[in-house]
Image (spheres, rainbow, N blue to C red):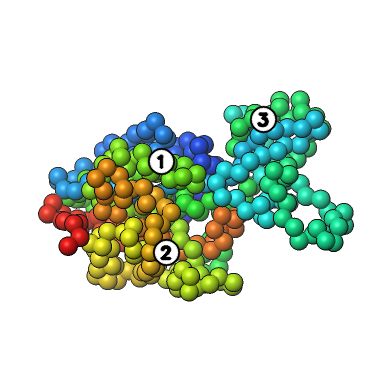
Amino acid sequence: MNAEDFAFLKELVETPSPSGYEQPAQRVIKKQLDGIADGLYTDVMGNLIADLKGEGGPRVMLAGHCDEIGFMVQFVDDRGFIYFGAIGGVDPHLSPGQRVLIHTDNGEVPGVIGKKAIHLIEPKDRDKVINLKKQFIDIGCSTCDEVEALIQIGDPVTFAVGVQPLQNDRATSRAFDDKMGAFIVTEVMKRVKEQGIITADLFAVSTVQEEIGLRGAATSSYGVNPDVGIVVEVTHATDYPDVEQSAIGRVELGKGPVIARGANINPVLFKLLVETAATEEIPIQIIGVPRATGTDANVMQLTRGGVATALLGIPLRYMHTPVETLSLSDLDQAIALLVAVVKRIKKDSSFIPV
């Protein structure tokens, strides 16, 4: 990945966007697509939708969600400790002892999720998970009034970590799930624009509220009304200790994007992805998903009279933690594959399975 692309990815991933609070991330993407897209707008849900006009071919929608897991301020006690709820699937094992940022109308307020010292915990209780409702944020204030002068009930909270390069073209951060998907669909649109006219009408959509029920994808798919849709998501890597490969498949970082196969996936579109990857010499991995995928692809497939849908995954270690880890080369390969696929969709392309 070149320096310019990495800078965009880093800015997007580090910009806070818990579900329902995605506007800062959407502004980062909008800045990238200004002057690129033929149309660029935000719908009432907060989805950012960009389009490139083709030559009257099928309507192709690429989607990646820009929301991340996080927390929300819900209560402040008399001593100035802040109690919070989870936005999305937060593991309560992970949050105690973490630094966080509370995102207010007046800027970021740093804090820590407190945890009783191990010396003060009875031995029988040391392995117990602290219920999320009992966890609290300490921002250094001593009274409720002090806290409420700085923050409001309902302010979102994120872990205070960002993107850090690792060895072998890998990187770690919070919120790769799924801001790297929104990054990919944005880059695909930019590169398709650079390479000239296409047959399909292309829509790149950064969806919202995926982590709390695939909500933005449901409304944006209905609004765009695509003939073909490809969702870009993270998928569980199985190349690290204690992960059962037989339950998911062999999924490795740096071995290329992952193409899902199963009931949620249109078989003709699946074949197009696989054949394009072979022609373009792009490495891919394949997993079998025998039911609904639990991603935006699920609601996209069922929109209106149905959409020919595919799911392209990026292998990710440690999903929904502050140290999500992936290979940057997998992102580059996914972009190249999607650009090539979009260019192969013609006016007479049919995705009716026969």
- Across and down, in percent, residue 160 comes to 64, 47
What residue type is disc 1 on? Gly
- Residue 5 in view of the camera: no
Quadrant of image for the C terminus:
bottom left
**Circle 2 sits in a helix, a strand or a loop, which is it?**
helix
- Sequence-wise, the earlier of marks 1 and 3 is 3
- Sequence-wise, the earlier of marks 2 and 3 is 3
Q: For the point 56% across and 54% down, which residue is it?
A: 320
Q: For the point 42% across and 35% down, which residue is it?
A: 46
What residue type is disc 3 on? Ile
- Residue 83 in view of the camera: yes
Q: For the point 16% across and 48% down, which residue is it?
A: 57
**In the visual, does 39 lie left or right of 56?**
right
Quadrant of image for the N terminus:
bottom left
**In the visual, does 55 lie left or right of 131?**
left
Residue holding disc 3:
151
Residue holding disc 2:
330
Residue 216 marker: 1
- Label 3 environment density (alpha carbons within 10 Å; few <14, some 14–19, many ≥20): many
Figure check: 104 above or below 117: above
- Label 1 environment density (alpha carbons within 10 Å; few <14, some 14–19, many ≥20): many
